[in-house]
Amino acid sequence: MEPFKNEPLTDFSAAANKQAFEQALKQVAGEIGGEYPLIIGGEEVRSGEFIESTNPCRTTELLGRFHAATVELANRAVEQAEQTFSSWKQTSAKERSDYLFKAAALMRQRKHEFSATMVYEVGKNWIEADADTAEAIDFMEFYARENLRYAQAQPLTEIAGEANEMHYIPLGVTVVIPPWNFPLAILVGMATAALVTGNTVVLKPSSDSPWIAYKFYRLLEEVGLPAGVVNFLPGRGSSVGDTLVNHARTRMIAFTGSKEVGLRINELAAKTNPGQIWIKRIIAEMGGKDSIIVDSDADLEAAVAGVWSSAFGYQGQKCSACSRAIVDATVYDEFVDKLKTKTETIRVGVTDNPENFMGAVINEKAYNSILDYINIGKSEGRLITGGSAAGEGGYFIQPTILIDVDPKARISQEEIFGPVLAVIKARNYDHALEIANNTEYGLTGAVYSNSEDKITRAMTEFHVGNLYFNRKCTGALVGVHPFGGFNMSGTNSKAGGRDYLLLFMQAKLSSKQRR
Ligand code: NAP
């Protein structure tokens, strides 16, 4: 087997790649308007209650109608997953990894179709959508290999007279609850980590992105994954989330999303319900308020490019997005000027047109909330660019920069999850580090500096799960940058890292007396 390597990104400057993507956009556009069932135990189920997936860039474009789970169907999905667990847990690690290798290969073949779906469903531009699909492929390739590694004999200390072995075994029914912002990569990462280790899955996609989730479910069917290993259960978190989390036969919940929902799941999962004979395992990866420090001796061009891309890539809707630039006073004015100029080159509009760098934000609720934060920001800082909606027909918002923001202001502290950057002036490097650590989160961060001493200091003092130097704070790669934060950013599960699959398993020790 080849060692793991990251899936290359598509070079859209090559005419053939551009054409292939345009073709995929056409193909996927031809599928718009479908109606899709839930799938429990391989059986299509139609509840008659719908989640409608719409294009955030063209809000009147209804992409698909998805039959949504009821409480009764949520219970049924958990029960089905439990039933399937009795056979799935007995399959070999190799057999399970092979499903992932096959699914990765098939997704690679149909890469642009998956990416094009995200262009329509969640407003990703081509490059962002392509990176999302590449990451999904990476997760499958990486976890398939990791699963084989964990299936090997585990090293134990020898003792006379005994033959000891330790094996990792699965937990049981895993409820997988992903967000919409990496609607393929994060969903695939959590779901395949669960199934490859021998668990069965109830997959409840985000209500903003059920289409891409459905395509992934069908891909698993195509590679022959047995019915009931993954159960496709679109449904509103507010109506079926508690049922899935509370169910006595749910063994684990793998969640990625907001702090509010993550904390709620954590609290509910801690309660023991009648018939429950375990403590539920939980992964909860949550929000961020990520900072980039620009030091006095930083390469300012590089720092501007890194902040720009981290703040406005995918409309600032990444948990890793830079929402605070903390800039040393000596370079502050120059940095701000350069950043403003670069930001004003951004084109905002429909993302099936590759000339638009930024698309719409995900939905009306996000749109209103981001615009509210911009208004709050106007009183907390000085607006230098952006500051309002950007055009008609979709949830478009201008890339917005507010400068001279107080480190304790609301827009410095609360996750906005949109294209809004607060720029904060630091007296010196000590002050910059103090500001960088002053939120309840601790997900990503970056430092632009040419001083090795300052970089070394940040490595111990800048308290975030993913810290980068002289590069942007987004764009973690599977295997290369295991991902997960500290504090209210979640349980630090380190998705895409060597420890991740352990979270989906328990270890069993068997000790035989030697004769
Ligand atoms: P969200 O509103 O918390 O939703 C996430 C998922 O939880 C969705 O599938 C949602 O379903 C479901 N949900 C909602 N209420 C629930 C409940 N009571 N019980 C169970 N599930 C429930 O977050 P989002 O808006 O999708 O995603 C953005 C957030 O995710 C941001 O805070 C971002 O920072 C965070 N994020 C973190 C990471 C990380 O690795 N740390 C990565 C990506 C995103 P519905 O769609 O049906 O409501």
Image: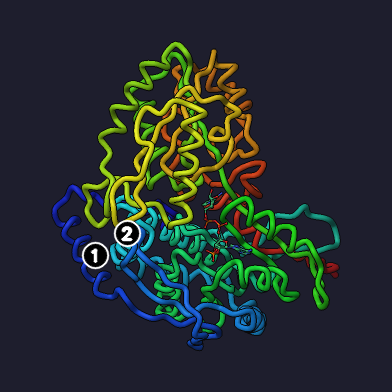
Q: How is the image coloured?
A: rainbow
Q: Residue furthest top?
A: 330
Say what secondary structure mark 1 lies in: helix
- Which residue corresponds to the image point at 66% horizontal and 49% vertical from the top-left? 491
Give how far apart the Cα atoms at labels 2 and 1 are.
8 Å
Nearest the camera: 147 or 462?
462
- Which residue corresponds to the image point at 45% horizontal and 81% vertical from the top-left? 224
Q: Position of residue 158 (x, y in %)?
A: 78, 54
Which badge, 2 or 1, comes first in the chain's sequence? 1
Q: Which mark is residue 119?
A: 2
Look at the picture and state if 134 lies above or below 457. below
Q: Which mark is residue 25?
A: 1
Give the number of marks.
2
Instruction: Tell me whether circle 2 and circle 1 mark residues in contact (CB < 8 Å).
Output: yes
Left/right of residue 203 with respect to residue 306 in the rendered view: right
The kind of residue tagged 2 is Val
Left/right of residue 163 with respect to residue 416 in the rendered view: right
Q: Is mark 1 within 8 Å of ligand 1?
A: no
Nearest the camera: 76 or 373?
373
Residue 462 visible within the image: yes
Nearest the camera: 88 or 51?
51
- Which residue corresponds to the image point at 24% horizontal and 64% vertical from the top-left? 25
Say what secondary structure mark 2 lies in: helix
Can you tell which quarter of the image residue 311 is in?
top left
Look at the picture and state if 293 lies above or below 188. above
Look at the picture and state if 291 lies above or below 261. above
The kind of residue tagged 1 is Leu
Screen quadrant of the N terminus: bottom left
Q: Position of residue 41 (x, y in %)?
A: 55, 85
Q: Residue furthest left?
A: 15
Q: Quadrant holding ligand 1?
A: bottom right
Q: Position of residue 492 (x, y in %)?
A: 63, 47
